[in-house]
Image (spheres, rainbow, N blue to C red):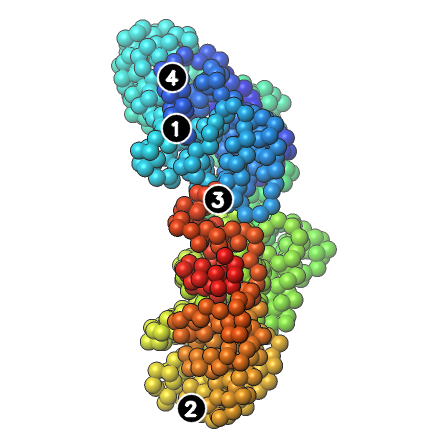
Amino acid sequence: MTVSPEHPAAPVIEGPWTSPPSPPAPLPAPRAARDHAEHAVPVATHLVDRPRLHALLDRHTADAAVTLVVGPAGWGKTLLVGSWLAAGAGGRRAAWVTLGPSHNDPRSFWDTLARAVGPHAGPAAAAALRRLDGRAGDPDELPGLFAHALRLAEGRVVVVLDDLHEITSAAVHAGLRSLAERPVPGLTVVATTRRDPPWPLHRLRLAGLVAEVRPEDLAFRDDEAITLFAQLGVPAGDGHVREVVARTGGWAAGMRLAALDLAGRPDLDAAVAVFSGDTHSVSGYLLEEVLGRQPSELVAFLERISVVDLVCADLADALTERDDGEARLAELSASHLFVQALDHPGRWYRLHRLVLDLLRARPVPRRTRRDRHRRAAEWFLRHAMPLEALRSAVRGELWGLAADVLGAHAISLLLRGSADEVARVLAGVPHPVLLEHPELAVGLAGARAVLGVPTQVRSLLAAVRRGADTLTGTRRQRLDLQHALVEGAESRRSGDLDAAVRAFRSVSVDVPTLDRWGVVDPAIVPTVVLANLGTAEMWIGDTAAAETHLRESAEEPGPASFPRVNAAAHLALLVCERGELDEADRRAREVVAVATDAGWTRAPQIAAAYLAMARTSLDRHELDDADRWVARLSEVEEAAPEPHVVLARALVLAGRRDLAGDHEDALAQLRLARTRAGSWTPPRPLTERWHLGEADLLARGGNPAAARALAARLGPPVTEAGLVAAARLRLHLGDDGVEGALGATTASALPRVRTEAGVVAALAAERGGTPDRALDLLEDALLAAAPFGLRRPFLAEPALADLLRRRVDRGSGAATFAVDLLERLTGTLTGTLPGTSRAAPVEPLTEREATMLRYLASTLSNPEIAAELYVSVNTVKTHQRSVYRKLGATGRREAVHRARALGLL
């Protein structure tokens, strides 16, 4: 049996070693070549004719929108569907897509499907599908657009999704599930998978929307196995074959291995008698037997290339010192037993896992083994694959070479997303070796620092300092650079932000100098330094310097990296601190999207984005959203807590409980933060928010003495936010001099400070007997807050309701916002604004939001709205939240009521 080279990742009969690999990142395929490989249908010869399975597929695809061909590796799923297509697929035109990890991105997935289906769907559908490719906008809308395009298709089309188990994205699965739940006429989906997709299969089966072909269907029957053995030229009798079928349960890969073992055996009775049907023992036994019967020259070739996980012809030649690697690898690949060709330019191959284990377990002289690993590492270095070079050097115990690789490449590897891989590779280095090689020690310390794992980082850094004098020249300069970076990162992790500033300011950011030192990818060093410097400056209150450094790092062109994500996340938080909530929301969501695509959702670098979203939601009085983002932040804390982030999260939780009226729980959150902080001293801005917030809760809870004592221990505030918080405390304690304590904060350039100060000043003026001044101050606060939807400063003061009502009665430049606040404070709806029949929202609705508003006025549920629009329920909720925010509503009924009052419905 052979398969076409266009589909090397789908061998004729899958075995336990055939898990499709991820292609090596440094050599991406051109789009045309990638499309050809993704969309190529496997072609095989000498297939066993299995009309019963073709008929089963015909029935299933005629009755159900989606047919799943499910089974573990080695059950012949891919070849069954390929042969069914070759037999006509029930008269349908067919498109084939081989899935891989890259398709977990929803946009990539639906773009790939559009390109695959377009040539088979007719001109009108093809034109509509072409518009999907590269389309900007919400990726959650792509399934609906794909479905609408296929409604224009001419005739019936079947789309084969090979290796659906490679898809782990919930968003992609949600889109596919929508195609099953709302079938498109003329479209049939057939998917091969090693495991059930995360769909409600029981319900879909009962509804007749999903059909399945499972291992019991795929298992070879006696007559089919007899035909297979005959086609392979194995002179086994029918009784022998039936015995093999009974012992393997009809497992296709086991049948193939058994056929290879029995071929040429003089005593078939004895061979069949010792044959085991257990999957693991079958594969182990037969591979040993088959490998032992191969020509010694071929075994020697396999042994030499087995030191690497992936191999190409040129690398094979370097390992074997021959020039026939290409021919040998192609020959082995065609056998479908030892080597699997990868769908990748340059003809990369992977040795089967079991064969690798067997070959690597064979005794080889230490010097020979080290030489092979050295050859591999040097080849990988020449071809810009440093991670593979490091892996080979460590496997070969070539500690000096591994140190050289890390010295030059560590910064790029760690900050471009390979920190976890570096940590795993270096975990195999004995601890005494790490202590003797400072470049290895700083590499492991750096990997753990990037991942937010403090284990042994301090002891590793101490080893680096002890061993630094053993290096000279550029190696010493690179070591000092990496040491300073890790010291800064560790100081940040422990909350010593002043030390972090000192460490990062000591690092050279001159790219030509770094290049002369042999630092690979030197341009990333200024990015990481500025990102971390800006982060530390933001937390200690040097916001002007922080913004400059964070913007410079976040806006650096190039691919995503931890430093850029970190900088962008903290920039979002900085904007949120100012009170510019729309920009904070936009920036934070962009960061979350990038981190999600990169698989960094629990990295410490993303925490500031979650914190910005939690604070923004709390400020807008979107309390459920605040809870959701706090939960995401908690997941990061579990993996990599930073004390300043932990304290900031406690402040958000306390604010959330306070808004809900649970002042005791709010106080408990802040006291818990005190316990968790231990001897750690927070930066001054956090300290002021923390202590003055706790004192304010004590004052409002009837414990003024404790509140005064806590404020006295803090001393005079030094930040604008602290001045406002101290004035608020005086207000709640009933002290005089509130407006004087505010200083110039009522004219602050920061919307948050100006709003909070205006609210406090207005309440103080009202209490002081100057109601007109109170109304003027409140108007200033409303005008400062309305453009950003900054509600919390008003809603945190229930005593503001009467003053706000008078402000609404007199009129306001932020009337809609003021009415919304009054309704939230009093729990009643006013309908329209005083003196008018209707008023527009502060921010107009987009076209999509206007559509969503019309659906909200219907009786459809969120899942039903999602089905109508071919989007996910999460997308519906996102649009709903935006509508609620713009209309100043807290729920669906209120939004519809408000929209009708404003003439929007």
* Amino acid type indicated by mark 3: Leu
The amino acid sitting under disc 4 is: Ala
First-in-chain label (2 vs 4): 4
The vertical placement of 812 against 905, above or below, is below
| CA distance separating discs 3 and 1 | 22 Å
- Residue lying farthest to the right in this orientation: 512
Labels 1, 4: front one: 1
Question: Residue drawn at (48%, 42%), measured in percent from left and top?
Answer: 870
Viewer-proximal residue, 884 or 188? 884
The amino acid marked with disc number 2 is Gly
> Distance of mark 2 from mark 3, alpha carbons?
55 Å
**Residue 518 image offset from top left, x and y in percent:** 67, 51
Could you tell me how far apart the alpha carbons at marks 1 and 4 are, in whole angstroms? 14 Å
Whether pointer 2 and pointer 3 mark residues with C-beta atoms closer than 8 Å, the reply is no
Identify the amino acid type marked 1.
Answer: Ala
Compared with 278, 823 (above or below) is below
**Residue hosting label 3:** 869
Residue situated in front as seen by the camera: 882 or 381: 882
- Tag 4 residue: 55
Residue assigned mark 2? 734
